[in-house]
Every structure is written in C-alpha cells, then in structure tokens.
Amino acid sequence: MSTAADPSPAGAVADVFGADPDRRLDAVPADRDRRLDAVPADRDRLIDDVRAALSELLGAERRLRGRDQHRDGLTYAQLRALTALRDGERTAGALAEAANCNPASTTAMLDHLEASGVIERRRDTRDRRVCLVALTGEGRRLLEQKRAGSQKIWQERFGAAPGTDLEAAARAMRTIAEMLDAH
C-alpha cells in the first residue's frame, strides 16, 4: 500500500483517494497534482491502481452489505428500495428499476416489507392493474434513521475534504459506472 511518503504517481493516487484509512482527504500533499502530471509514462500504473482500488471498494461494499443486514434486518436491496420511495410512491416495476432489483425478486421483497409494516401497496384508481408502493410512517422513520447514521459516518470521513476532491471522486466513480454499464 502506498503511503504519504511515496512520491510515485501511484502513491499520489492513493493519497487523493484515501487508500490509507488513517489519512483524511484534507491531508493530501500540496504538490499532488504536479506529481501526477509530471510522470505521464506511468499512466498505465495509475490506471492499474484505480482498477485495484475499485476492486477493494467493491469488496468492502460486499462486506458492508453483509454486516448491515445483521444489524437491522434490512438487506441492501431493501434499503435501496426504501430510498427510491423517499420522494413518493412508485409502481412496483419502477421501484425494481430504481432500486436495481430483479423484478421477479421485487415482489417477494415487497411482500416482506409490507408484512413488516415498512411499505404499503395499493391499486392505482385509474388502472387497477397497476400496483403502487409507498413508505409507511414506520418505513419513513426507519429510512431516516439509516440515512442519519450513514450521513454521520460520511461526514466524519469526508466533511473537511476539499470540494474539488469530492467532485473529482464523484466524477471518477460515475465514469467507472458508465464504463461497466457499457461493457
């Protein structure tokens, strides 16, 4: 793993993206950009470092999903579905798409969430074939509780990070998502 003392481009990327969990993004060396631009021949190594960091990120996300499910009984897919309902009701199909869930498994998930009192389903008054899904008061409370806990963690880690670093990280992640969706 690269450290702050590592003057290589890979070390600079590790600094930028916080590869060392004990370092905050606001502690990035002032000469970071110069070091990255000064060594274009090492671009392949930088790209490999981004790929490795993505692999680490995906592994950490899988482990988090496993831990979170045991903490409060919500799966990651259920949490995505509840989040998609935050701004109002949706059809079951639109909910499956917004939550990146398989439509076939969405019905079983909604059955569970409805039995838990977290969501409610109703037929659309204009088209009885359409099932609309909405959060209940309990569902909204649970979602806000999860969101507040998550926000606290993100603020502790990134609250003092320069906005330009956060924007660059968001752009990089969206670029990777587009790349993965395209292939």
Image (spheres, helix red, strand yellow):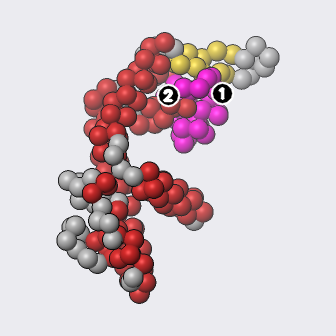
Which segment did they paint magenta?
Answer: 85-110
Q: Is residue 114 visible?
A: no
Report whether 180 appears left or right of 46.
right
Q: Determine whether the residue tagged by mark 1 lies in a helix, strand or loop.
A: strand
Amino acid type assigned to the residue bearing label 2 in the image = Leu
Task: Classify 55 as above or below 89.
Answer: below
Q: Is residue 14 left or right of residue 172?
A: left
- Picture coordinates of residue 32 (x, y %)? 34, 70
Determine which of the numbered discs, if any, sits on residue 91 in the image.
1
Q: CA distance from mark 1 to mark 2?
A: 13 Å
User: Which quarter shows the N terminus?
Assistant: bottom left
**On the rendered structure, is 118 left or right of 63?**
right
- As helix, strand or loop, the secondary structure at mark 2 comes to helix
On screen, residue 165 above or below 87: below
**Residue 31 at x, y percent in the picture:** 33, 71
Q: Nearer the viewer, mark 1 or mark 2?
A: 2
| Residue 157, image x, y percentages | 30, 45
Of labels 1 and 2, earlier in sequence is 2
